[in-house]
Image: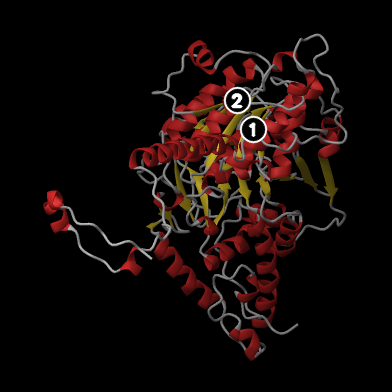
Amino acid sequence: MALPRVRDENRAKKDDDYRFRPAAATTFRPSTTWRMPRRRRLLVLAVLAIALLYLLSISLAADRSVYSIHPPPRWPDVEVAPDPFPDVGHPSKEDERLRFPELSKSLSKSRLAGTGRRGVLFAAASLRSVADLLPLACEKTRHSYETVHFAVMGREPVSIEGIQYVNGISSDDCKLVWHDARAEHAASFTDARMVNAVDYALWNLLSTLYVDAVIAHGPALEEDFFIQAIGRRAEKHGVPLVSLPARARDLMWIADLDGRALRAWNHFNVELLIQAPSGSSASLVRLLRSLNRADYLGTTPKLTIELPTRTDPQLLKFIKRLRGGALSPERISLRRRVPLKRMTPLEAAIQTVEAFYPSDPSHSHVLLLSPQAELSPSFYHFLKYAVLKYRESYRSARSKNLLGVSLDLPTVKPTDDTPFTVPDIDAPFFCWQSPNSNAVLYFGDKWAEFHTFMVNLLETSAAKAEPSEKQISTKYPAFMEMLLKFIRTRGYFLLYPSFPARQSISMAVIHEDFYQAPEEFLDEHATSHETEDKAVDFESVKTTLYGASTLANFIRRLPDRLPGLARLPFLAFDGSTTTFEELTEASHEFAKKLNVPNVACSKHAQSRTVGSHYSYNADGLLCVPDR
């Protein structure tokens, strides 16, 4: 029972404030909540915040970085010494795991500052390779909107700042993202351990960065351990490796190619096709010598020569003695025709088209050459640059209508033999709906489509039993007549160079001497005596053949930024100025005229032509009778 409270007169003021409570309310109850004093509570919160910040900083440095808890990946066939530092006083337990402290910092910055932009990675281990690659890498930062990374991974302990100073590079002029991908104590590593170090660094780089391609030097300027590691790691990650076969200063045109174009670098394949004349082979020997002097960027192209029934024996002797150049006799294929009778235009056209069919339509192309042609030593560089730039890049709009790339600029229109004048343009290229047979590259997928188109066209013509109107001059091979119909039906065009008319240099020159009319039109030429009268009109623009084996000097004559395909001028098949939209509309109209329905066509065959103009398969282009 609670005792009654005793009132004190001396404490009247305090008692006045006292509020009486019943005895039951004064029973003791333990407090259910406890609060820490305010100052101590703030101190504890501050300690917890510091601890969280410390853990977060460790996580950023270790997340997907070189401080992985997993051991570095090793290949079964790579022998790694269990104690790679027998003469160095470092504990073996510390050196069992590869450490890349500088790479950890740069990758963390790239992750924090990155926005998912695509990029290109330059990688080098040798200081000679670093010095050679830097001008190309810096040039790419000026030409591209992509992020350009540069990784150094070797043994030399030179700092990134020292590399920049020695090579005269500043961050303002060359906006590279540097990565010091050298392992700790790399100067003491064996080659086997360096293979693992480079592989582990590349694994972190390719796993962290968004890169479309890796650019590096080949064995001529690089270390063996680097070549072994970078090839395997790039293949495992599915990232194309652009291995430069020459010094970078000779391949500066690579800076104008974006990441998507570089992804197709290793897939680019060209087969050469030549139809030898039946008479003297002097012109063909000149062409073969120019092909043998060319540089093919470390590859050896396949060459096919279509021989007539009566072949010049001097030509066979020359091919047999062909040594010491880019062409290899093992890569030259000779095909000799058996029939003695002269071919008709239709037979000649079929023979030309049948001479090539792409093994990979997307990347295997054919370079059709006239015996009167002579090519520049750097023509292959030019073709690869033009194809990757205007067909494979991110900005290759309307490339689906691009049929190929011409090396020469004709002086006459093949349709009516009238003089052709290059339009007054500033661009070094223009698009023309005119076929070519002098020196022209046709894309593999378009050539395969042309095969199907010819089959359907022949069946359609046979069903109509009507002779087709000829539009191409008899000075050109017969297949160009069908090719022109194919171009006009599909709305395709060729990329022609305009710089020969202004700068007097060309990648191909067509000579008038030793000219021979196509075999299928020899009778017409002999009757009309027009071979000698029009031989001069056959050649290309009067220019000087570009004699360098690289495009270094040639690229300097071009604008800094070449216009895209959509911004180039367009010409119709007759040489008149037009637009891409007008070409598309004209192709619809020509397809309707070419595809006149007839009784032999079934309703199913006729329905296939409606609304299928832009289908990839050429089967839907013509109204073909049921087979």
Image coordinates of residue 103 in percent, x first then y, are 59, 28
Tell me if residue 411 comes above or below residue 362 in the rendering. Answer: above
**Which numbered disc flags the more N-terminal residue, 2 or 1?**
1
Q: Quadrant of residue 191?
A: top right
Q: Which residue bears the numbered disc 1?
A: 66
Task: Tell whether 528 sits left or right of 194.
Answer: left
Q: Are the residues at dot 2 and dot 1 in contact (C-beta closer than 8 Å)? A: yes
**Which one is nearer the viewer's eye here, 558 or 623?**
558
Residue type at mark 1 is: Val
Across and down, in percent, residue 395 comes to 47, 50
Q: Residues within 10 Å of mark 2 (few under 14, many from 20)?
A: some
Q: Amino acid at mark 2?
A: Pro
Residue 312 visible to an observer of this rendering: no
Residue labelled with disc 2: 101
Residue 164, compared with residue 73, is above or below; it is above
Of the numbered discs in the image, which one, if any, rests on residue 245? Answer: none
